[in-house]
Protein backbone atom coordinates (compact mmCIF):
# COMPACT_ATOMS: atom_id res chain seq x y z
CA UNK A 1 0.00 0.00 0.00
CA UNK A 2 1.37 3.39 -0.97
CA UNK A 3 1.77 6.20 1.59
CA UNK A 4 -1.11 8.04 -0.09
CA UNK A 5 -3.40 4.99 0.19
CA UNK A 6 -2.39 4.49 3.82
CA UNK A 7 -3.19 8.10 4.65
CA UNK A 8 -6.57 7.85 2.91
CA UNK A 9 -7.63 4.57 4.53
CA UNK A 10 -6.39 5.43 8.02
CA UNK A 11 -8.87 6.96 10.46
CA UNK A 12 -7.54 8.57 13.62
CA UNK A 13 -9.43 8.08 16.87
CA UNK A 14 -9.01 10.21 19.99
CA UNK A 15 -10.09 7.41 22.36
CA UNK A 16 -11.94 4.11 22.22
CA UNK A 17 -14.87 4.28 19.79
CA UNK A 18 -16.83 1.47 18.05
CA UNK A 19 -13.80 0.22 16.16
CA UNK A 20 -15.93 -2.45 14.50
CA UNK A 21 -17.58 0.29 12.42
CA UNK A 22 -14.20 1.39 11.08
CA UNK A 23 -13.21 -2.15 10.10
CA UNK A 24 -16.66 -2.72 8.55
CA UNK A 25 -16.04 0.32 6.34
CA UNK A 26 -12.79 -1.23 5.10
CA UNK A 27 -10.70 1.36 6.92
CA UNK A 28 -7.76 1.21 9.34
CA UNK A 29 -8.16 2.72 12.82
CA UNK A 30 -5.24 4.55 14.41
CA UNK A 31 -5.44 5.32 18.12
CA UNK A 32 -3.76 8.72 18.27
CA UNK A 33 -3.01 8.30 21.97
CA UNK A 34 -0.98 5.17 21.32
CA UNK A 35 0.69 6.81 18.33
CA UNK A 36 1.68 9.79 20.48
CA UNK A 37 2.92 7.99 23.58
CA UNK A 38 4.94 5.45 21.55
CA UNK A 39 6.41 8.06 19.20
CA UNK A 40 10.20 8.34 19.53
CA UNK A 41 9.87 12.13 19.59
CA UNK A 42 6.68 12.56 21.63
CA UNK A 43 7.98 15.80 23.10
CA UNK A 44 8.37 17.14 19.58
CA UNK A 45 4.70 16.45 18.87
CA UNK A 46 3.80 18.56 21.89
CA UNK A 47 6.12 21.34 20.73
CA UNK A 48 4.44 21.30 17.31
CA UNK A 49 1.07 21.91 18.97
CA UNK A 50 2.48 24.74 21.07
CA UNK A 51 3.97 26.30 17.96
CA UNK A 52 0.49 26.21 16.40
CA UNK A 53 -1.03 28.06 19.34
CA UNK A 54 -1.85 25.49 22.03
CA UNK A 55 -1.18 26.99 25.49
CA UNK A 56 1.54 25.54 27.69
CA UNK A 57 -0.95 24.93 30.50
CA UNK A 58 -3.22 22.56 28.60
CA UNK A 59 -3.31 18.77 28.71
CA UNK A 60 -0.27 17.17 27.09
CA UNK A 61 -2.47 14.45 25.62
CA UNK A 62 -4.45 17.02 23.60
CA UNK A 63 -1.24 18.58 22.32
CA UNK A 64 0.27 15.17 21.58
CA UNK A 65 -2.80 13.99 19.68
CA UNK A 66 -2.79 17.17 17.61
CA UNK A 67 0.90 16.72 16.86
CA UNK A 68 0.36 13.07 15.95
CA UNK A 69 -2.29 14.02 13.38
CA UNK A 70 0.01 16.63 11.85
CA UNK A 71 2.95 14.20 11.81
CA UNK A 72 1.19 11.01 10.69
CA UNK A 73 -1.40 12.60 8.45
CA UNK A 74 -4.73 10.77 8.86
CA UNK A 75 -7.23 12.76 6.83
CA UNK A 76 -10.16 11.77 9.02
CA UNK A 77 -10.42 11.77 12.80
CA UNK A 78 -13.24 10.43 14.96
CA UNK A 79 -13.39 12.40 18.19
CA UNK A 80 -15.47 11.60 21.25
CA UNK A 81 -17.22 14.83 22.19
CA UNK A 82 -19.17 13.42 25.13
CA UNK A 83 -17.86 10.75 27.48
CA UNK A 84 -14.13 11.43 27.34
CA UNK A 85 -12.13 14.66 27.25
CA UNK A 86 -13.60 18.07 27.98
CA UNK A 87 -11.21 19.62 25.44
CA UNK A 88 -12.08 17.28 22.57
CA UNK A 89 -14.42 19.72 20.82
CA UNK A 90 -11.78 22.45 20.55
CA UNK A 91 -9.18 19.87 19.48
CA UNK A 92 -11.47 18.75 16.66
CA UNK A 93 -12.04 22.34 15.58
CA UNK A 94 -8.28 22.92 15.50
CA UNK A 95 -7.83 19.83 13.34
CA UNK A 96 -10.71 20.84 11.07
CA UNK A 97 -9.04 24.21 10.55
CA UNK A 98 -6.06 22.28 9.15
CA UNK A 99 -8.29 20.53 6.62
CA UNK A 100 -8.82 17.29 8.55
CA UNK A 101 -12.30 15.77 8.24
CA UNK A 102 -13.63 15.37 11.77
CA UNK A 103 -16.42 13.00 12.77
CA UNK A 104 -17.94 13.51 16.24
CA UNK A 105 -19.13 10.59 18.33
CA UNK A 106 -20.99 10.81 21.66
CA UNK A 107 -21.49 8.24 24.38
CA UNK A 108 -25.05 8.91 25.62
CA UNK A 109 -25.50 10.21 29.12
CA UNK A 110 -27.31 8.71 30.85
CA UNK A 111 -26.67 5.44 29.01
CA UNK A 112 -29.55 4.71 26.64
CA UNK A 113 -29.92 1.98 24.04
CA UNK A 114 -32.01 4.27 21.83
CA UNK A 115 -29.39 7.03 21.95
CA UNK A 116 -26.51 4.60 21.37
CA UNK A 117 -28.29 3.16 18.33
CA UNK A 118 -28.68 6.70 17.00
CA UNK A 119 -24.98 7.50 17.50
CA UNK A 120 -23.90 4.17 16.00
CA UNK A 121 -26.03 4.73 12.93
CA UNK A 122 -24.63 8.25 12.48
CA UNK A 123 -21.09 6.89 12.66
CA UNK A 124 -21.87 4.12 10.18
CA UNK A 125 -23.42 6.63 7.78
CA UNK A 126 -20.38 8.89 8.01
CA UNK A 127 -18.03 6.02 7.16
CA UNK A 128 -20.22 4.32 4.57
CA UNK A 129 -21.21 1.10 6.33
CA UNK A 130 -24.04 -0.34 8.43
CA UNK A 131 -24.64 -1.43 12.01
CA UNK A 132 -25.29 -4.95 10.70
CA UNK A 133 -21.81 -5.10 9.13
CA UNK A 134 -20.31 -3.67 12.32
CA UNK A 135 -22.06 -6.42 14.30
CA UNK A 136 -20.44 -9.01 12.03
CA UNK A 137 -17.07 -7.46 12.89
CA UNK A 138 -17.92 -7.56 16.59
CA UNK A 139 -18.31 -11.32 16.31
CA UNK A 140 -15.13 -11.53 14.26
CA UNK A 141 -13.20 -9.78 17.02
CA UNK A 142 -14.54 -11.90 19.89
CA UNK A 143 -11.68 -14.48 19.73
CA UNK A 144 -9.13 -11.64 19.90
CA UNK A 145 -10.90 -10.12 22.89
CA UNK A 146 -10.92 -13.55 24.58
CA UNK A 147 -7.15 -13.75 24.12
CA UNK A 148 -6.85 -10.33 25.79
CA UNK A 149 -8.85 -11.71 28.70
CA UNK A 150 -6.41 -14.61 28.94
CA UNK A 151 -3.41 -12.26 29.05
CA UNK A 152 -5.12 -10.30 31.81
CA UNK A 153 -5.88 -13.51 33.73
CA UNK A 154 -2.25 -14.58 33.44
CA UNK A 155 -1.32 -11.26 35.02
CA UNK A 156 -3.59 -11.35 38.08
CA UNK A 157 -4.20 -15.07 38.60
CA UNK A 158 -1.11 -16.89 37.36
CA UNK A 159 1.24 -13.96 38.06
CA UNK A 160 3.24 -14.59 34.89
CA UNK A 161 2.63 -11.26 33.10
CA UNK A 162 4.09 -7.95 34.21
CA UNK A 163 1.97 -4.87 34.73
CA UNK A 164 3.46 -3.19 31.66
CA UNK A 165 2.93 -6.24 29.44
CA UNK A 166 -0.71 -6.50 30.49
CA UNK A 167 -1.24 -2.76 30.04
CA UNK A 168 0.24 -2.67 26.54
CA UNK A 169 -1.87 -5.57 25.26
CA UNK A 170 -5.09 -4.24 26.76
CA UNK A 171 -4.58 -0.62 25.70
CA UNK A 172 -3.70 -1.77 22.19
CA UNK A 173 -7.19 -3.20 21.79
CA UNK A 174 -8.53 0.30 21.12
CA UNK A 175 -7.42 -0.13 17.49
CA UNK A 176 -5.85 -3.64 17.39
CA UNK A 177 -2.80 -2.06 15.80
CA UNK A 178 -4.92 -1.49 12.70
CA UNK A 179 -4.74 -5.21 11.88
CA UNK A 180 -6.77 -7.63 14.06
CA UNK A 181 -5.33 -10.73 12.37
CA UNK A 182 -1.76 -9.74 13.12
CA UNK A 183 -2.78 -8.62 16.63
CA UNK A 184 -4.29 -12.05 17.28
CA UNK A 185 -1.12 -13.81 16.15
CA UNK A 186 1.00 -11.62 18.41
CA UNK A 187 -1.26 -12.35 21.38
CA UNK A 188 -1.16 -16.10 20.72
CA UNK A 189 2.63 -16.00 20.54
CA UNK A 190 2.89 -13.95 23.71
CA UNK A 191 0.58 -16.29 25.66
CA UNK A 192 2.57 -19.33 24.54
CA UNK A 193 5.86 -17.66 25.52
CA UNK A 194 4.66 -16.69 29.00
CA UNK A 195 3.36 -20.15 29.93
CA UNK A 196 6.88 -21.29 30.80
CA UNK A 197 7.69 -18.38 33.10
CA UNK A 198 8.17 -18.59 36.83
CA UNK A 199 5.49 -16.68 38.79
CA UNK A 200 6.46 -13.05 39.22
CA UNK A 201 5.07 -12.91 42.75
CA UNK A 202 7.80 -15.39 43.75
CA UNK A 203 10.64 -13.31 42.37
CA UNK A 204 13.60 -12.48 44.58
CA UNK A 205 14.09 -9.09 46.17
CA UNK A 206 10.53 -8.39 47.34
CA UNK A 207 11.07 -6.46 50.60
CA UNK A 208 7.79 -7.53 52.19
CA UNK A 209 6.13 -10.76 53.25
CA UNK A 210 4.72 -10.95 49.73
CA UNK A 211 4.26 -8.84 46.62
CA UNK A 212 1.94 -5.84 47.01
CA UNK A 213 -0.96 -6.16 44.56
CA UNK A 214 -2.12 -2.87 43.06
CA UNK A 215 -4.91 -1.66 40.79
CA UNK A 216 -4.32 1.11 38.26
CA UNK A 217 -7.25 3.50 37.82
CA UNK A 218 -7.81 6.19 35.25
CA UNK A 219 -6.58 6.97 31.77
CA UNK A 220 -3.50 5.18 30.42
CA UNK A 221 -0.37 6.96 31.64
CA UNK A 222 1.67 9.41 29.63
CA UNK A 223 4.61 7.92 31.59
CA UNK A 224 4.40 4.09 31.13
CA UNK A 225 7.45 3.74 33.37
CA UNK A 226 5.07 3.74 36.34
CA UNK A 227 4.47 0.01 35.80
CA UNK A 228 8.13 -0.97 36.04
CA UNK A 229 8.72 1.50 38.85
CA UNK A 230 6.27 -0.17 41.23
CA UNK A 231 7.81 -3.58 40.51
CA UNK A 232 11.19 -2.27 41.58
CA UNK A 233 9.51 -1.26 44.85
CA UNK A 234 8.07 -4.71 45.54
CA UNK A 235 4.59 -4.30 44.02
CA UNK A 236 2.83 -5.03 40.73
CA UNK A 237 -0.23 -3.71 38.93
CA UNK A 238 -2.58 -6.65 38.44
CA UNK A 239 -5.64 -4.59 37.48
CA UNK A 240 -5.85 -1.94 34.77
CA UNK A 241 -9.27 -0.38 35.06
CA UNK A 242 -9.69 1.64 31.86
CA UNK A 243 -7.37 -0.40 29.64
CA UNK A 244 -9.30 -3.54 30.59
CA UNK A 245 -12.49 -1.75 29.59
CA UNK A 246 -10.94 -1.03 26.18
CA UNK A 247 -10.85 -4.81 25.63
CA UNK A 248 -14.64 -5.10 26.22
CA UNK A 249 -14.28 -7.97 28.70
CA UNK A 250 -17.96 -8.84 29.28
CA UNK A 251 -20.24 -11.09 27.24
CA UNK A 252 -23.04 -9.07 25.63
CA UNK A 253 -25.73 -9.69 23.03
CA UNK A 254 -24.78 -7.15 20.36
CA UNK A 255 -22.61 -4.15 19.48
CA UNK A 256 -25.05 -1.64 21.00
CA UNK A 257 -24.92 -3.37 24.37
CA UNK A 258 -21.14 -3.72 24.12
CA UNK A 259 -20.64 0.04 24.07
CA UNK A 260 -23.28 0.64 26.74
CA UNK A 261 -21.50 -1.90 28.97
CA UNK A 262 -18.19 -0.04 28.53
CA UNK A 263 -17.89 1.84 31.85
CA UNK A 264 -15.35 4.59 31.17
CA UNK A 265 -17.60 7.18 29.38
CA UNK A 266 -20.41 6.96 31.88
CA UNK A 267 -20.84 7.35 35.64
CA UNK A 268 -18.22 7.20 38.38
CA UNK A 269 -20.67 5.08 40.34
CA UNK A 270 -20.63 2.36 37.67
CA UNK A 271 -16.86 2.59 37.43
CA UNK A 272 -16.55 2.32 41.22
CA UNK A 273 -18.72 -0.80 41.26
CA UNK A 274 -16.50 -2.38 38.60
CA UNK A 275 -13.34 -1.39 40.50
CA UNK A 276 -14.61 -2.77 43.82
CA UNK A 277 -15.72 -6.02 42.20
CA UNK A 278 -12.36 -6.55 40.49
CA UNK A 279 -10.46 -5.48 43.62
CA UNK A 280 -12.08 -8.27 45.59
CA UNK A 281 -11.64 -10.86 42.86
CA UNK A 282 -7.98 -10.02 42.28
CA UNK A 283 -7.05 -9.57 45.93
CA UNK A 284 -5.85 -5.99 45.57
CA UNK A 285 -4.03 -4.33 48.46
CA UNK A 286 -4.25 -0.78 47.13
CA UNK A 287 -5.30 1.42 44.23
CA UNK A 288 -3.33 4.07 42.33
CA UNK A 289 -5.40 6.69 40.53
CA UNK A 290 -3.41 8.27 37.71
CA UNK A 291 -4.52 11.76 36.72
CA UNK A 292 -3.26 14.00 33.95
CA UNK A 293 -2.28 17.57 34.71
CA UNK A 294 -4.86 20.17 33.58
CA UNK A 295 -7.55 17.48 33.17
CA UNK A 296 -11.10 17.71 34.50
CA UNK A 297 -10.84 14.08 35.60
CA UNK A 298 -8.71 15.20 38.54
CA UNK A 299 -12.05 15.78 40.26
CA UNK A 300 -12.92 12.06 40.14
CA UNK A 301 -11.33 11.58 43.56
CA UNK A 302 -14.29 13.44 45.08
CA UNK A 303 -16.29 10.27 44.36
CA UNK A 304 -13.56 7.63 44.40
CA UNK A 305 -12.39 8.39 47.93
CA UNK A 306 -15.91 7.70 49.21
CA UNK A 307 -16.90 4.84 46.92
CA UNK A 308 -13.81 2.63 46.78
CA UNK A 309 -12.99 0.05 49.41
CA UNK A 310 -9.20 -0.21 49.08
CA UNK A 311 -6.52 2.35 50.05
CA UNK A 312 -6.16 4.96 47.31
CA UNK A 313 -3.19 7.04 46.15
CA UNK A 314 -3.50 9.70 43.44
CA UNK A 315 -0.50 10.36 41.20
CA UNK A 316 -0.45 13.30 38.78
CA UNK A 317 1.80 13.57 35.72
CA UNK A 318 2.16 16.08 32.90
CA UNK A 319 4.47 15.26 29.98
CA UNK A 320 6.12 12.14 28.52
CA UNK A 321 9.32 10.93 30.11
CA UNK A 322 10.29 9.48 33.44
CA UNK A 323 8.15 9.70 36.54
CA UNK A 324 9.05 12.76 38.57
CA UNK A 325 10.86 12.39 41.89
CA UNK A 326 7.78 13.49 43.84
CA UNK A 327 5.60 10.84 42.20
CA UNK A 328 8.19 8.12 42.80
CA UNK A 329 8.52 9.15 46.45
CA UNK A 330 4.75 9.04 46.99
CA UNK A 331 4.49 5.62 45.33
CA UNK A 332 7.34 4.30 47.44
CA UNK A 333 5.75 5.51 50.68
CA UNK A 334 2.34 4.13 49.70
CA UNK A 335 3.73 0.70 48.81
CA UNK A 336 5.90 0.57 51.92
CA UNK A 337 2.99 1.32 54.27
CA UNK A 338 0.89 -1.38 52.63
CA UNK A 339 3.75 -3.89 52.41
CA UNK A 340 4.74 -3.56 56.05
CA UNK A 341 1.16 -4.28 57.11
CA UNK A 342 0.59 -7.38 54.98
Image: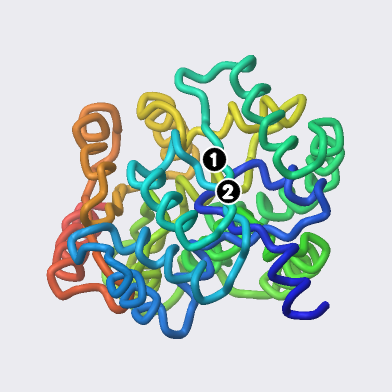
Residue 20 shown left or right of residue 300 in the figure: right
Q: Which circle marks residue 260 in the picture?
A: none
| Marks 2 and 1 in Cβ contact (< 8 Å) | yes
Q: Is residue 50 above or below residue 298?
A: below
Residue 66 shown left or right of residue 157 in the figure: left
Residue 104, position in %: x, y? 54, 40
> Under tag 2, what secondary structure?
strand
Location of mark 1 (residue): 104
Quadrant of the frame with the N terminus: bottom right
Location of mark 2 (residue): 78
At a point 74% along the width and 43% down the height, the residue shown is 21
Which residue occupies the foreground of this view, 93 or 84? 93
Q: Is residue 315 above or below residue 273?
A: below
Which residue occupies the foreground of this view, 184 or 74? 74
Q: In this view, does 243 lie above or below 135?
A: below
Residue 110, position in %: x, y? 46, 18
Where residue 126 sits, quadrant-wise, is: top right
Colour scheme in use: rainbow
**Residue 154 in view here:** no
Q: Residues within 10 Å of mark 2 (few under 14, many from 20)?
A: many
Residue 242, position in %: x, y? 47, 46
At a point 83% along the width and 54% down the height, the residue shown is 26
Residue 35 shown left or right of residue 235 in the figure: right
At a point 76% along the width and 25% down the height, the residue shown is 253
Residue 229, position in %: x, y? 32, 73
Residue 303 shown left or right of residue 137 in the figure: left
Amino acid sequence: MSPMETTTSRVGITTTVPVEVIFAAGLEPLDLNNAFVSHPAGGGLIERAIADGFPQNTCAWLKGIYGAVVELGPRRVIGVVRGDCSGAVVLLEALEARGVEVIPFSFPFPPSREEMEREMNKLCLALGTTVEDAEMWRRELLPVRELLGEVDRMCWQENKVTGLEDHLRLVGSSDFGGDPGRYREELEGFIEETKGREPLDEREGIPFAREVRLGYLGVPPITPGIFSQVERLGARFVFHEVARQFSMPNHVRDIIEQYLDYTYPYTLRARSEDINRESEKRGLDGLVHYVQSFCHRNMEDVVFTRALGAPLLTVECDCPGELGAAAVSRLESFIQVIGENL
